[in-house]
Amino acid sequence: MPEKEKKELNLNIKELQKKLEECQKLQKEYLAGWQRARADFLNYKKEELKRMEELVNLAKSKIFLKFLSILDNLERAKALIPEDLKNSDWVKGIFQIENQLRNFLKEEGIEEIKTEGEHFDPNFHEAVEEVEAKDKKPGQIVEVLEKGYLLNGQLLRPAKVRVAK
């Protein structure tokens, strides 16, 4: 092979090597960019799922609050049933509906906040009134006016209570 052809061949090889190095550099940049974009997308997807879950929980909590109002009214009605009607099949049926409602709420993660005799906690209780109570310590709950509830461990509705002075 003549010398001139060898030089041209070496130049072509060097140019090709240079182009190959540039392509490899670009390939690394593109791969890193793609990996970052993929990680960003996966993070976005997780955040979006979390937001959707929060939205569903918000909607559920509004519905559950309405169910709790119904349950409160059933309890009030239960307390006012005349003695002669307490053994009525109709009244027993209403109590069965109340039990079904309680079981449904429990299955959905709703639990009642313990209040009677507990110390007042502003995170879970709403003080409606302070009253004199000889047999109670100051800050202790004397009476529950409206039960409070948690939804999956988070406050859904605070208990409305009377507290000892």
Image (cartoon, helix red, strand yellow):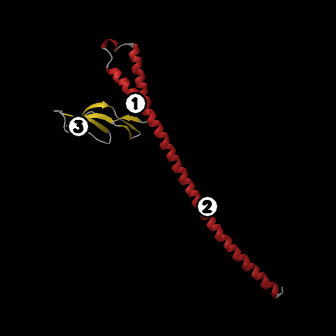
> What's the CA distance linking mark 2 and mark 1?
50 Å
* Residue farthest to the right, as pictured: 1
Q: Is residue 7 above or below residue 78?
A: below
Asked where in the image residue 2 lies, by quadrant, the reply is bottom right
Q: Is residue 129 visible?
A: yes
Say whether residue 111 is left or right of residue 50.
Answer: left
Amino acid carrying mark 3 in the image: Gln
Look at mark 2 in the image and give the residue it sits on. Answer: 34
Residue lying at 59% horizontally and 60% vertically, measured from the top left: 35
The numbered mark at residue 55 is none
Asked where in the image residue 120 lies, by quadrant, the reply is top left
Look at mark 3 in the image and give the residue it sits on. Answer: 140
Q: Nearer the viewer, residue 1 or 25?
A: 25
* Residue farthest to the bottom, as pictured: 3
Q: Is residue 61 above or below residue 97?
A: below
Callout 1 secondary element: helix
How many residues crowd mark 1 within 10 Å: few (<14), some (14–19), many (20+)?
many
> What's the CA distance linking mark 3 and mark 1?
25 Å
Which sits earlier in the primary sequence, circle 3 or circle 2? 2
Q: Is residue 162 above or below residue 43?
A: above
